[in-house]
Amino acid sequence: MSKGKFEFLDGYPADVLAIEAVGEIGADAYEHHLIPALEAKIAAEGKIKLLYVIGDRFDGFSAKAAWDDARFGLTHLGDFAALALVSDIEWVRLGVQVFAPMIPGAFAVFHVAELDKAKAWICEAGKPREDHSHDTDATHKLPTLEDKQPPMG
């Protein structure tokens, strides 16, 4: 197992923090890297969206890191507008779904093969959808007033 870290992924909107867990994640990775980054993003953006990838390069969590993760998540539940978890690890997927009802924002779980779908989802999550249900079909022209004039003469 390698010493764990969180890799911060680039190319997302300002309100999205995208991370990948790599190696065996210990308390140091949370306390000195992830938590300060999350708190800075929350301070700058207000509610944020989190894309959390736990893929093939993940080796596990230390007990202290698991505690830090749970404590931070519970403390800042109201600060997340959306959360997308990307993982094929069944215990991680099931564990996070247990807490899903407590997450006030949008929440989705994706498989690693669906990473592109997760990226698109997290970027769009929370944006108001345009309602086109009352739009009219503008393929027909309205008749001009000249067509409505009675015939002269």
Image (cartoon, helix red, strand yellow):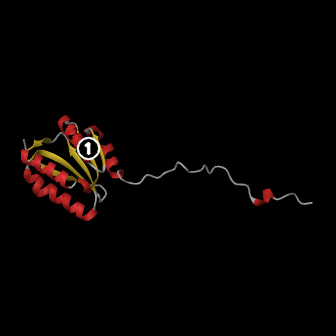
- Residue 19 on image: x %, y %: 21, 50
**Disc 1: CA contacts within 10 A as few (<14), some (14-19) or many (>=20):** some
Give the residue at the far top of this rendering: 90
Quadrant where the image shows the C terminus = bottom right
Residue 85, relative to residue 47: is it above or below?
above
What amino acid is at disc 1? Ala
- In percent of width and height, residue 22 lies at 14, 46
Seen at 21% across and 55% down, the residue is 76
Q: Which residue is mark 1?
A: 100
Task: Name the residue rendered at 28%, 38% in the picture.
Answer: 113
Residue 143 in picture, x, y percent from top left: 73, 55
* Residue shown at 61% from the left, 49% from the top: 137
Point out the residue furthest to the front here. Answer: 102
Front-most of 71 and 116? 71
Left or right, 142 with respect to 117, comes to right
Extreme residue toward the right, this view: 153
**How many numbered marks have been drawn onto this rendered protein structure?**
1
Question: Is residue 146 rendered to the left or right of residue 109?
Answer: right
Q: Secondary structure at mark 1?
A: helix
